[in-house]
Amino acid sequence: MGQEASQPRPGTSLQVIGAGLSRTGTASLSQALEILLDAPVYHGGTQTCLGPPSHITSWIQILKHTPIRSLSDRAFVLRTLKSTLDGYAATTDTPGAQFVPELLELYPDAKVICTVRDPDEWAKSIGATSQQALQWYLRVVLLPLTTMRHFPAYLDALQAGRYGELYSRPGDANLYRRRVWDRHMEYLKKVVPEEKLVFFDVRDGWGPLCDALGVDVPETEFPNSNDGQAIEEFAKRQVLAGLVAWGWILGGIAAVAGVVSMMKK
């Protein structure tokens, strides 16, 4: 997750579809692509959590039209994806990584880059993150926050929609296990032409990425963002902000009640 949401640049079209799952170095890839493409990049986690509410609510509506069951579902998904991502040179992270075939239809010349890491380590990492994100009390704590109040509904729509469609099988009790990784790789190899699909480990630095995009290696160091640490720090800030907001709300209610009680006396 980046530090702030990117702003779209009119006239910019998607050149790279980031197909890597969350916690695979997607924030580092986003920063690297911003340098190489000299244009804004849409990092899903950052835009939905730190952007204006329209970002997360748009994704909720997209996800509610998945699995796609009708022509109207398909038209809505394509139309809303395009309006959401226009002005960005690349998209990375979930939920864009789960809409690769639709994005290829909209942007047929785009390159698909999937960030990778050790699958078992990924499973441990995403499992810990999901456990924090799915705590029941967050539905109450985040309610006063303009954007993050929508986050529980977004997670519900993600699991009931495309995420569950791609990775869930009858009897599965948890969507954040190693099997999700394996199914994601199968999905990409099925929907992306071999010549368009690149697997990239951010620890390998500029070389493979620049080769894939056909650009020169920049003189700056390759970005190194700690996704796990950034997510943990962000989560703590949001919980604290929610608790503070609830403190003001409850304090205001108590004050009004006190005034009303005094007036009655």
Image (cartoon, rainbow, N blue to C red):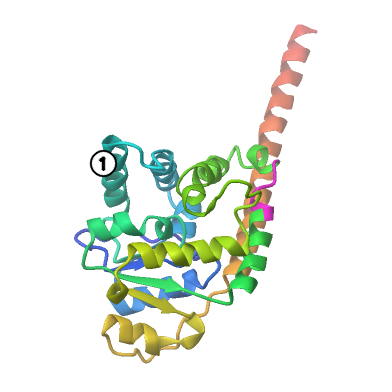
Classify 10 Å Cα crowding around label 1: few (below 14), some (14-19), many (20 and above).
few
Specify the quadrant of the image occupied by residue 226.
bottom right
- Say which quadrant the C terminus sits in: top right
- Residue 22 in view in this figure: no
167 lies left or right of 236? left
Residue 160 on image: x %, y %? 51, 42
Q: Any magenta on residue 169? A: no
104 lies left or right of 230? left
Instruction: State the residue in front, 30 or 18.
Output: 18
Instruction: State the residue in front, 264 or 35.
Output: 35
Magenta span of residues: 131-136
Residue 55 on image: x %, y %? 41, 48
Is 256 placed above or below 146 here?
above
Q: Residue furthest left?
A: 11
Residue ID for mark 1: 75
Q: Any magenta on residue 135? A: yes
Which amino acid does the dot numbered 1 rest on? Ala
Residue 78 on image: x %, y %? 28, 47
Specify the quadrant of the image occupied by residue 13.
bottom left
Instruction: State the residue in front, 161 or 238.
Output: 161
- Residue 212 in view in this figure: yes
Residue 170 on image: x %, y %? 58, 46
Q: Residue at x 64, y 55 (%)?
A: 130
Q: Residue furthest top?
A: 264
Instruction: State the residue in front, 89 or 177.
Output: 177
Q: Residue at x 21, y 68 (%)?
A: 109
83 lies left or right of 1? left
Q: Residue at x 45, y 87 (%)?
A: 205
Q: Residue furthest right?
A: 265
Q: Secondary structure at mark 1?
A: helix
